[in-house]
Image (tube, grey):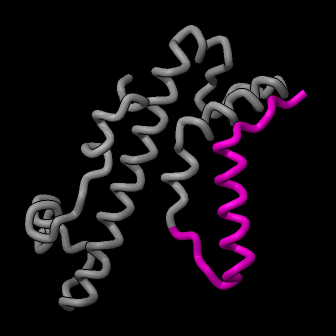
């Protein structure tokens, strides 16, 4: 039997469904901030455990995760997700800058990381989330 869905997750689903129905051509570009919310991850974990899910690609089972510490594991999982988003944003920004300034790809010499953050004002997601309670692993 699947655990009951938290109210916060029901509200998220309702809002996303309403937006999709209201604007069928709308593109949901970034749902990472929704998918990696603590309540969403905890509910997904509870559903998988209730269904007696198998270990993931990393070979970790529920016993391993709980022995390691569920909160710690979720915090690290969230941190990995934000680092992946951050890396993707840097890549896409460099692609755009290379096209705009007619520079050959990858453009890391012309647009190094420091300039993306310092000169262009790009925000580092893992750095922004480090002080949030769920990010302390």
Quarter in which the N terminus is drawn: top right
- Find out whether residue 69 is within the magenta segment: no
In the rendered image of this protein, does residue 25 appear above or below residue 51? Answer: below
User: Which residue is located at x 55 percent, y 19 percent?
Assistant: 70
- Find out whether residue 10 is within the magenta segment: yes
Residue 11, percent from left and from top: 67, 52
Residue 127, percent from left and from top: 25, 43
Residue 119, percent from left and from top: 9, 68
Seen from this angle, which residue lies furthest top?
A: 67
Q: Is residue 2 left or right of residue 136?
A: right
Residue 101, percent from left and from top: 18, 89
User: Which residue is located at x 63 percent, y 24 percent?
Assistant: 59
* The magenta segment: 1-29
User: Which residue is located at x 72 percent, y 48 percent?
Assistant: 10
Q: Is residue 103 left or right of residue 92?
A: left
Q: Looking at the picture, tell me which residue is in the foreground, 119 or 111.
A: 119
In the rendered image of this protein, does residue 80 appear above or below residue 28? Answer: above
Q: Would you identify the image quadrant in which residue 53 lies?
A: top right
Quarter in which the C terminus is drawn: top left
In the rendered image of this protein, does residue 8 appear above or below residue 11? Answer: above
Q: Would you identify the image quadrant in which residue 85 lies?
A: bottom left
**Picture mark count:** 0
User: Which residue is located at x 54 percent, y 36 percent?
Assistant: 38
Q: Is residue 53 left or right of residue 41?
A: right
């Amino acid at each position: 039997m699947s655990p009951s869905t938290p109210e916060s997750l029901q509200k998220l689903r309702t809002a996303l469904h309403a937006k999709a129905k209201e604007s069928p051509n709308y593109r949901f570009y970034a749902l990472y901030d929704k998918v990696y919310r603590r309540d969403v991850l905890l509910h997904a974990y509870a559903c998988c455990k209730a269904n007696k899910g198998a270990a993931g690609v990393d070979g970790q089972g529920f016993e391993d995760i709980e022995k390691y510490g569920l909160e710690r594991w979720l915090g690290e999982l969230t941190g990995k997700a934000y680092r992946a988003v951050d890396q993707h944003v840097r890549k896409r920004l460099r692609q755009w800058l290379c096209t705009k300034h007619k520079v050959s790809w990858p453009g890391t010499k012309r647009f190094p990381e420091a300039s993306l953050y310092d000169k262009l004002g790009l925000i580092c997601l893992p750095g922004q989330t480090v002080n949030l309670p769920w990010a302390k692993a």
